[in-house]
Amino acid sequence: MTPRAPRKPGPRTRPPTEAARVDYTGAVYGSLLAASVIVGAGTLGAFPRLELVLLLLCTGAVFWAAHVFSHLFGDRMADRSMDLEEVRRVCADERPILDAALPPALAVAVGPLLGLGLQATVWLALAVAVAGQVGWATAAAVRVGAPRRLVVAVGVINLLLGLIIVAAKAALQH
C-alpha cells in the first residue's frame, strides 16, 4: 500500500489549534430559514400543525443536505481527497442548520398542550426561531471574544433581520 499524499489545505480545513472551535453560522442561518418557513407556510391543509412541523424538519434537512453536498463537491473540485471521515466531518459541521429547525418545530408541536390556537402557535414558533437566531449570533460573538459593542451590534442586527420576517408575517396575515 502506497502512502497517500498529504491533503491540500482547503477552505474547510481547520488548523489544529482550532479543533475545539464551534461555528454558529449554520445555527443562525437555520434559525432564519425556520422563521422564513413559518411565515411562508401560509394556509396549510387538514392537519396544519403536523404539516408545519414536517415542513420545518424537511426544509432543515434539505438545506443541511444541500450544504453538505456543496462543501463536499467544492472540496472535490479543489482536488482534495475525500474519504468517509471527511464526509462525517462535513455532515457534523453543517448539522446546526438541521438542529435550528428543532426548537420551532417543537414549539408548533407543544402549542396545543399550552392551549394555543393555530395562529398563536405559529407566532410562538416564529418567536422561538427569531430568539434562536439572535441567541446563536450573540453566542458566536461572545465565543470569539468580540468587544461588548460588537456583541450588542450582532444581537441587534440579527434581531432586526428577525423582525423583518415578523413584519412580513404580520403583513401577509389575512
Image (spheres, helix red, strand yellow):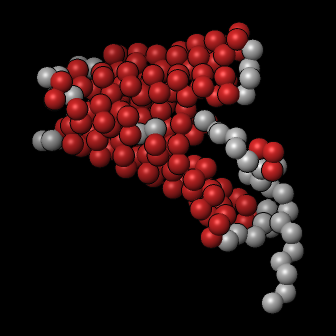
The answer to whether residue 161 is seen in the rendering is no
- Estimate the x, y position of residue 57 in percent, counting from the top left: 36, 46
Question: Closer to the camera, 58 or 106?
Answer: 106
Q: Tell me what residue is drawn at x 55 percent, y 28 percent.
A: 136
Q: Quadrant of residue 25?
A: top right
Q: Is residue 27 left or right of residue 128?
A: right
Is 34 rendered above or below residue 94? above
- Image quarter (top left, top right, bottom left or bottom right) of the C terminus: top left
Q: Residue furthest top?
A: 149
Is 86 rendered above or below residue 35? below
Q: Tell me what residue is drawn at x 21 percent, y 42 percent.
A: 50
- Estimate the x, y position of residue 130 in percent, counting from the top left: 45, 23
Q: Is residue 64 left or right of residue 146?
A: left
Q: Tell me what residue is drawn at x 47 percent, y 33 percent.
A: 31
Q: Tell me what residue is drawn at x 84 percent, y 87 percent.
A: 2
- Image quarter (top left, top right, bottom left or bottom right) of the N terminus: bottom right
- Estimate the x, y position of residue 98 in percent, counting from the top left: 47, 46
- Estimate the x, y position of residue 159 in percent, counting from the top left: 52, 16
Question: Closer to the camera, 98 or 46?
Answer: 98
Q: Quadrant of residue 144?
A: top right
Q: Quadrant of residue 118?
A: top left
Question: Closer to the camera, 6 or 36?
Answer: 6
Count the labels in the image. 0
The answer to whether residue 83 is seen in the rendering is yes
Question: Closer to the camera, 98 or 43?
Answer: 98
Is 73 rendered above or below residue 115? below
Is 6 rendered above or below residue 117? below
Q: Is residue 73 left or right of residue 115?
A: right
